């Protein structure tokens, strides 16, 4: 197991390097630069600014400088938020995205697995159709529709929850602000997970070992929880890696709508501002995150499924 | 045809539902208690502020969101009243020499930095030198150009000490100018001209403008800053006019999404918004008309012609034809519709300048269209041989609507075949600057100070922002004459003459003058709005509600 893990870590390094190089050249290839605004800069000042950010050096040298910094955990200074370093922006933004993402994933797992399992047991009955119809709706309605609707209902009309913002006076003060973004983030995931769980549970419930368990006269709950759930959750698990990364990183729209200071907004604003270092920082950070989650999922897979363990 | 009309009818019906059925919240009681002037117990103001500010270092910051906050954190030599009139700021008085070249300011004796240190003339000397120093990397220092030697200092040819500013003693500060500049006092309200605390800047380097070390001389001081979320300012007890300040705390929120901003306003989480979403205009007019505040703004919305490339190079007649064919009333009142004023000239109404009104402004639209057709034919175009042209705008729903309206009007009146193209903002800026692929492009210009020159200079042949490629020796000469003219009235006449030259050449097609549009809660007292859109929190109060 340990050797397997080690091998995976080494395999990730070239992937990351390729990602960095691609991101590095692509953001620079985009037309328009970080210092282009409606008001043209004085040439002397522009030259000085470019020199201050080493943009006057040849590209390979810039890349080398960037990698050098990265090796020491330094993502460089932000071009747009001139008083801040990218490392600092990520350090402040990530915990926010993580809190939202983790809550949303937890909610999605709880509700999604329950609903999917329940639907599987009632296959082709009206309740099954109802759950599946609801989840189809969940998948197809985008965040930017759900978010504003939630705000209109619960903040403007009912006045139960704040319409947005992110108080920093402690988690308790923030809880009401988290409810709607978490729901908006979790809804599509709930839907996916419910459908995945249902599909694989139906398959598992039809398999021989379950039939065997039934023949032995085991209670329905024992069959479900001890025998069917584990193999039934395998596809959900493999979906969990990319999904968790997507929820934590893909909260771009939700963060904008609810005024949450997470990483997703840096990604969008950074790209619009051509804030090279900020975009690079977020891309590299996300890259590491996605690789890490996939790795964790693979390990869990091995723990849950003896067949995978043996092959390795 | 039938299907189309059914679709149209249903769209309209849906649109109507969305707007009509929602009710605005009416939860608050009589504003200001029984007297109408009673103050609220909690004096905390919540302001929507657009995108995340770039910095709170007045010399390195750029953009409206930063400036809004800096206005509360600092005070220039001169400040503004709620209606925009210039009033004494850090300087209690000033004298201007007869030739208009020397300004002598008397710094008020009770001015204090937020750390308690006195504000002196030396702070302003240091501040302005730092601002002009190219090593500060100020992106806005070019507005200092009227000050003696500023251009050379910014270009790195002279040391910052050569700048025409001098602290004679603690309370006397002198600014020497290159040429007489009637707008200098207004310019001094700009953050580029603020003083900064030398000790704090030199001890902390470029990081001084963060929460831990920020020091200002304004009515408020920096309390908390969470990037992409909010910036809290608390009242600065050291401020000289603290006794007349009412609001204890002001919170600026970074909300770039206008719909989200309006919703937070409606949920009573914001007292003032930065703007409104254009597509909600109708709903706002129906439901929150009393809270919707529209003020003329120092800006012109226009489309520019690239005068260096075909089909518009050397053809003012054709440019005029396209300009005349546009019904500005429709663009301003119907397509935009928030109170924008139709524009036939380049410089918006500013003090000390007679607005130019070309003859076509007085014509009926039918007359304009007739003249447009005549000029179009004269340029060699006809129904068989129509002008084909590309209209470029930066990606945005509002600009798209205007561009579609233009293309439609040109098609109707002249038979022009216009195609629309849009580009993301930074790509658009680069294309426009290159002047190779553009034919007609969207643009807007917001003045940096209340003077016609901030508009006039844009079309100078040497100006780097002259994306029109406009090159008129006569225009340049008139601008040069205006810059050197000590007599204020004569200077205005040169600038007015220059604008007439410009309007006759049609390198651009003004469409409307901007307005600021925002929501202000009825309990916010003291909000007046002004042409620069400079809203100082210290002039506001929150009434009981």
Image: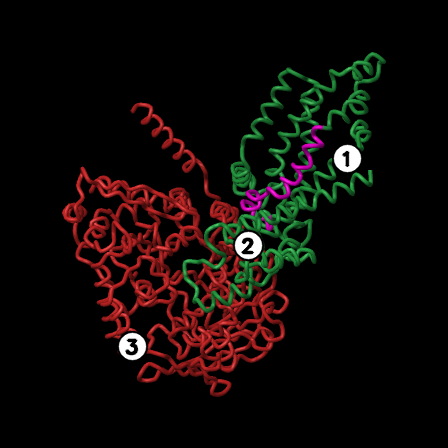
Chain colours: A green, B red
In the image, residue B88 above or below residue A271: below
Q: Position of residue B475 (x, y in %)?
A: 25, 66
Q: Are marks 1 and 2 in contact (CB under 8 Å)?
A: no
For label 3, the SS is: helix
Chain under numbered label 1:
A
Quickly name the residue at label 1: A300
Chain under numbered label 3:
B
Residue A237 drawn in magenta: yes
Residue B126 vs residue B134, the one in the foreground: B134
Q: Quadrant of residue B3?
A: top left
Quickly name the residue at label 2: A276
Number of numbered labels in the structure image: 3
Quickly name the residue at label 3: B484
Task: Return the disc, 1 or 2, that comes first in the chain's sequence.
Answer: 2
The answer, for residue B179, to whether it is visible in the render is yes
Q: Residue furthest top?
A: A215
Q: Position of residue B176 (x, y in %)?
A: 39, 82
Q: Main secondary structure of the magenta part?
A: helix
Question: Are the residues under marks 1 and 2 on the same chain?
Answer: yes
User: Distance from label 3 to label 1 (Cα)?
Assistant: 78 Å
Between disc 2 and disc 3, the foreground one is: 2
Q: Position of residue A76 (x, y in %)?
A: 61, 59
In the image, residue B151 above or below residue A67: below
Instruction: Tell me the tag on residue B227.
Output: none
Mark 3 surroundings within 10 Å by alpha-carbon count, few (fewer than 14), some (14 through 19), many (20 or more): few
> In the figure, is residue A93 to the left or right of B278?
right
> In the figure, is residue A218 to the left or right of B515?
right
Q: Magenta stretch?
A: A235-263
């Amino acid at each position: 197991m340990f050797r397997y893990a080690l091998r995976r870590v080494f395999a990730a390094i070239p992937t990351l390097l390729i990602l960095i190089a691609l991101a590095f050249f692509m953001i620079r290839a985009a037309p328009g630069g970080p210092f282009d605004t409606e008001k043209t800069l004085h040439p002397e000042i522009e030259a000085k600014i470019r020199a201050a950010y080493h943009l006057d050096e040849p590209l390979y040298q810039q890349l080398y400088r960037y990698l050098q910094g990265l090796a020491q955990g330094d993502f460089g200074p932000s071009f747009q938020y001139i008083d801040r370093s990218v490392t600092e922006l990520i350090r402040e933004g990530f915990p926010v995205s993580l809190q939202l993402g983790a809550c949303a994933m937890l909610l999605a797992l709880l509700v999604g697995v329950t609903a999917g399992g329940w639907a599987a047991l009632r296959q082709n009955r009206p309740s099954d159709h109802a759950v599946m119809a609801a989840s189809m709706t969940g998948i197809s309605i985008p965040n930017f529709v759900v978010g504003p609707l939630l705000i209109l209902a619960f903040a403007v009309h009912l006045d139960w929850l704040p319409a947005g913002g992110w108080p920093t006076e402690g988690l308790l003060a923030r809880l009401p602000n988290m409810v709607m973004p978490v729901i908006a983030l979790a809804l599509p995931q709930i839907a996916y997970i419910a459908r995945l769980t249902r599909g694989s549970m139906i398959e598992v419930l039809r398999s021989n070992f379950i039939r065997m368990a039934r023949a032995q006269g085991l209670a329905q709950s024992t069959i479900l929880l001890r025998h069917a759930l584990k193999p039934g959750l395998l596809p959900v698990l493999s979906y969990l890696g990319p999904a968790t990364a997507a929820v934590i990183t893909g909260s771009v729209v939700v963060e904008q709508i609810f005024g949450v200071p997470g990483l997703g907004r840096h990604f969008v604003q950074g790209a619009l501002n051509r804030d090279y270092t900020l975009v690079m920082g977020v891309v590299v950070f996300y890259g590491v995150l996605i690789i890490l989650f996939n790795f964790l999922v693979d390990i869990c897979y091995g723990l849950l499924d003896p067949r995978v363990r043996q092959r390795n | 045809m039938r299907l189309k009309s059914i679709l149209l009818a249903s769209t309209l019906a849906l649109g109507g539902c969305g707007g009509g059925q929602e009710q605005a919240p009416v939860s608050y009681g009589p504003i200001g208690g029984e007297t109408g002037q009673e103050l609220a117990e909690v004096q905390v103001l919540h302001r929507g502020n657009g995108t995340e500010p770039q910095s709170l270092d007045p010399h390195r910051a750029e953009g409206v969101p930063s400036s809004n906050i800096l206005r509360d954190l600092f005070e220039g030599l001169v400040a503004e009243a709620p209606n925009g009139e210039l009033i004494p700021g850090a300087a209690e008085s000033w004298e201007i020499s007869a030739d208009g070249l020397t300004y002598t300011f008397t710094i008020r004796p009770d001015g204090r930095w937020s750390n308690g240190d006195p504000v002196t003339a030396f702070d302003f000397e240091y501040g302005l030198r730092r601002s002009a120093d190219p090593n500060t990397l100020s992106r806005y220092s070019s507005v200092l150009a009227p000050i003696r030697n500023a251009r050379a200092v910014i270009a790195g040819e002279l040391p910052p000490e050569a700048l025409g500013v001098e602290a004679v003693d603690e309370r006397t500060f002198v600014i020497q100018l290159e040429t007489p500049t009637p707008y200098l006092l207004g310019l001094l309200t700009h953050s580029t001209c603020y003083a900064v605390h030398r000790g704090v800047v030199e001890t902390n380097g470029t990081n001084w403008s963060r929460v831990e070390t920020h020091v200002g001389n304004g009515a408020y001081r920096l309390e908390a800053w969470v990037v992409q979320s909010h910036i809290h300012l608390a009242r600065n007890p050291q401020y000289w006019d603290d006794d007349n300040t009412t609001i204890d705390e002001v919170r600026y929120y970074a909300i770039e999404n206008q719909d989200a901003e309006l919703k937070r306003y409606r949920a009573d989480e914001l007292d003032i918004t930065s703007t409104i979403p254009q597509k909600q205009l109708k709903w706002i007019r129906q439901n929150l008309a009393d809270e919707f505040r529209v003020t003329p703004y120092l800006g012109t919305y226009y489309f520019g012609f690239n005068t260096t490339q075909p089909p518009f190079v050397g053809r003012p007649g054709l440019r005029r034809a396209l300009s005349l064919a546009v019904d500005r009333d429709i663009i301003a009142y119907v397509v935009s519709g928030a109170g924008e004023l139709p524009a036939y000239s380049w410089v918006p109404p500013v003090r000390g300048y007679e607005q130019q009104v070309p003859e076509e402004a007085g014509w009926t639209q039918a007359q304009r269209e007739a003249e447009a057709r005549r000029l179009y034919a004269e340029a060699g175009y006809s129904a068989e041989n129509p002008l084909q042209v590309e209209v470029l705008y930066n990606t945005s729903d509002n600009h798209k609507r205007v561009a579609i309206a233009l293309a439609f009007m040109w098609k109707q009146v002249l038979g022009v075949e216009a195609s629309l193209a849009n580009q993301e903002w930074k790509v658009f800026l680069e294309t426009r600057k290159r002047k190779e692929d553009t034919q007609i492009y969207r643009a807007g210009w917001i003045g940096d100070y209340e003077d016609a020159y901030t508009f006039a200079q844009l079309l100078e042949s040497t100006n780097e922002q002259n994306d029109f490629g406009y090159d008129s020796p006569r225009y340049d000469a008139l601008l040069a004459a205006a810059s050197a003219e000590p007599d204020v009235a004569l200077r205005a006449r040169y600038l007015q003459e220059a604008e007439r030259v410009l309007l006759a050449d049609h390198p651009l097609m003004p469409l409307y003058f901007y307005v600021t549009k925002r929501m202000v809660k009825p309990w916010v007292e003291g909000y007046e709005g002004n042409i620069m859109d400079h809203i100082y929190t210290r002039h506001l109060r929150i009434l009981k509600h």
